[in-house]
Amino acid sequence: MAAVPERKPVSTSLQTWLSQGEQLYAAALNDFRAIEAQLDDLEQKLAAKQAEVNQIAQVIGKPAVEGARRLSAQLSPIPGMVEEAGRLPVPMAPSGGQPTNSSNATIARALSGKFGR
């Protein structure tokens, strides 16, 4: 009897694709962290400069400057959303957690560009 060749549980191309995805994620995360550090540094410099300008303004009788900075937003949990570690939050399905066939069809139409036709 001939020996049956051993099958790999996951194809090599899928493993390669996942590996490339991990590398892209790691590179993007490193870029994000570097930009975040630069932003922190700039915010500290801006605060120091604002204090300096306001000190000078007080001495010469000018009004103090207020930063026209945007507010930093922080994400908070939204009621009715399901959150799992390592995944984006998704809305809860009306059927108690399981998407219905109609919601799947609606999503498929939206993704195919046939939504609302």
Image (cartoon, rainbow, N blue to C red):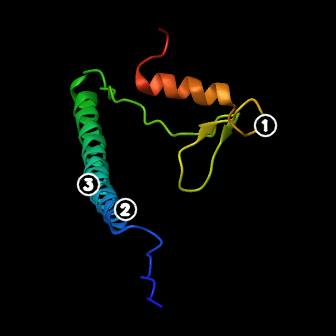
Left or right? Give the position of 20 relative to 93: left
Residue 110 tag number? none
What residue lies at 27% left-to-right and 51% top-to-bottom?
A: 41
What residue lies at 74% left-to-right and 29% top-to-bottom?
A: 94
Q: What element carries label 1?
A: loop
Disc on the earlier residue, 1 or 2: 2
Name the outermost residue toward the right: 96
Up-down: is 1 above or below 16?
below
Residue 14 tag number? 2
User: What is the distance, in whole Å, between disc 1 and disc 3 at their CAs?
Assistant: 39 Å
Disc on the earlier residue, 1 or 3: 3
Q: What element carries label 3?
A: helix
* Residue 43 pos. (x, y %): 30, 44
Up-down: is 95 above or below 1?
above
User: What is the distance, in whole Å, between disc 2 and disc 3 at their CAs?
Assistant: 26 Å
Left or right? Give the position of 98 relative to 21: right
Left or right? Give the position of 22 relative to 59: right
What residue lies at 69% left-to-right and 31% top-to-bottom?
A: 100
* Residue 50 pos. (x, y %): 27, 36
Q: Which of marks 1 and 3 is in front?
A: 1
Residue 96 tag number? 1
Quadrant housing residue 85 = bottom right
Residue 31 tag number? 3
Residue type beneath disc 3: Asp
Q: Which of marks 1 and 2 is in front?
A: 2
Residue type beneath disc 2: Leu
Up-down: is 32 above or below 61?
below
